[in-house]
Amino acid sequence: MKDKILVTGANGNLGKKFMLSKGEVDVCALVRSEKAKNDLMNFVQAHDIQDIQIVKCDYLDEQVIKELARSCTYVLHLVGIIKENKDNRFDVVHKQTTKALVAAIKGSDIKKCCYISILGAKEGSENTCFSSRGLAEKLFLDSDIPSLVLQVPMVLGEGDYACEALKKNALSRINFTFRKLSLEQPIYAKDIIDVINIDINRTLKENYSSIGIKALAGLTSLTREKLIMKAAKQLGVKVKVFSLPLFLGYTLARICEMLFSHPPITRAMLGVLDHDDDIDPLPSSKELGINLTALDEMLEATISA
């Protein structure tokens, strides 16, 4: 019998990329809505991916998850948002969902969990996105199941939202952004998938595998302005980047929060996007067993795709 991986938030970009690269393991893919289920089914069929079980379920339903986890040996938790609205609250999406998952797999045959978090996550942060992520991390680390928490910055992958947004900014000729000197340290989506697959293989073979919080980012930290200009160069165009005052963004976000149940921008989201990412990724990448993709190579693979 093959090992099975339980994947939450499986219909996102990382979930789909994991399924494309999963190797010989089976996957139980959890999604929250019928729309997400149909989308993932179409993706799996279009790419002829075998041994995928897609289940629509409430992420807070411990009994359903407990039953599904009985046949699994590893959990990949990909649920997370950076923009809150009336239907998706940070407390529910991050803390309560993780709490239910940890409770559901307690006492099971799950050997390990991997949680994809974000750089800046911290339990005591004033930013509600960061603090709720930090609480979710703590729930995993305090559980009786070995857990790897990957804190990552902007993720660039072929066809994903961040990649398309960067491409749009690069092609705009004149680009306005909040605090253009904010530091970005994008990581290639494939690098994250490689870490996950290596950790799964190590865990299933009962070899040494990393636990705890590991901060992982790309090799290059640069200003948002320079990143946009670098992307423009990759596309063969020129762009001028102008900085808007951050207080203006927070004011606009506050107004949007008051007027809309699904605001296009929020203060917490701005805080996440404005976080300065500048870490040394080499210790973590070495421990996790990967060679990080250089920024130019990453942009060539994603922006030019």
Image (cartoon, grey):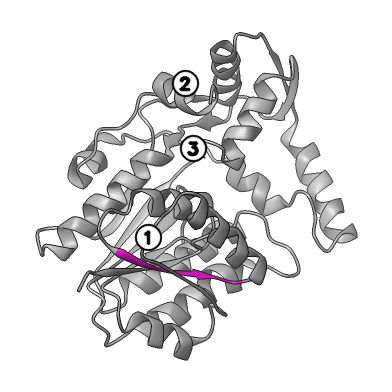
Which residue is the site of mark 1? 50
Q: Secondary structure at mark 1?
A: loop
Direction right: furthest residue: 259
- Would residue 203 be visible to someone looking at this image? yes
Q: Secondary structure at mark 2?
A: helix
Q: CA distance from mark 1 to mark 3?
A: 23 Å
Inspect the image, locate mark 1, and give the three-letter code of the amino acid beneath it.
Gln
Q: Position of residue 223 (x, y in %)?
A: 54, 24
- Name the foreground residue: 73 vs 54: 54
Q: Position of residue 65 (x, y in %)?
A: 44, 83
Inspect the image, locate mark 2, and give the three-letter code of the amino acid beneath it.
Glu
Q: CA distance from mark 1 to mark 2?
A: 30 Å
Q: Secondary structure at mark 3?
A: loop
Task: Please indicate whether residue 217 sits to the left or right of residue 210 in the image.
Answer: right
Q: CA distance from mark 3 to mark 2?
A: 11 Å
Task: Please indicate whether residue 162 sits to the left or right of residue 111 in the image.
Answer: right
- Name the foreground residue: 87 vs 274: 87
Q: Position of residue 256 (x, y in %)?
A: 84, 53
Say which label, 3 or 2, has the lower sequence index.
3
Q: Is residue 237 magenta?
A: no
Inspect the image, locate mark 3, and give the three-letter code of the amino acid beneath it.
Gly
Which residue is the site of mark 2? 300
Q: Where is residue 281, by image quadrant? A: top left
Say which label, 1 or 3, has the lower sequence index.
1
Q: For the stretch drawn in magenta, what is the main secondary structure?
A: strand
- Name the foreground residue: 263 vs 51: 51
Direction bottom: furthest residue: 63
> Over which residues does the magenta segment extend?
26-32
- Would residue 274 be visible to someone looking at this image? no
Which residue is the site of mark 3? 157
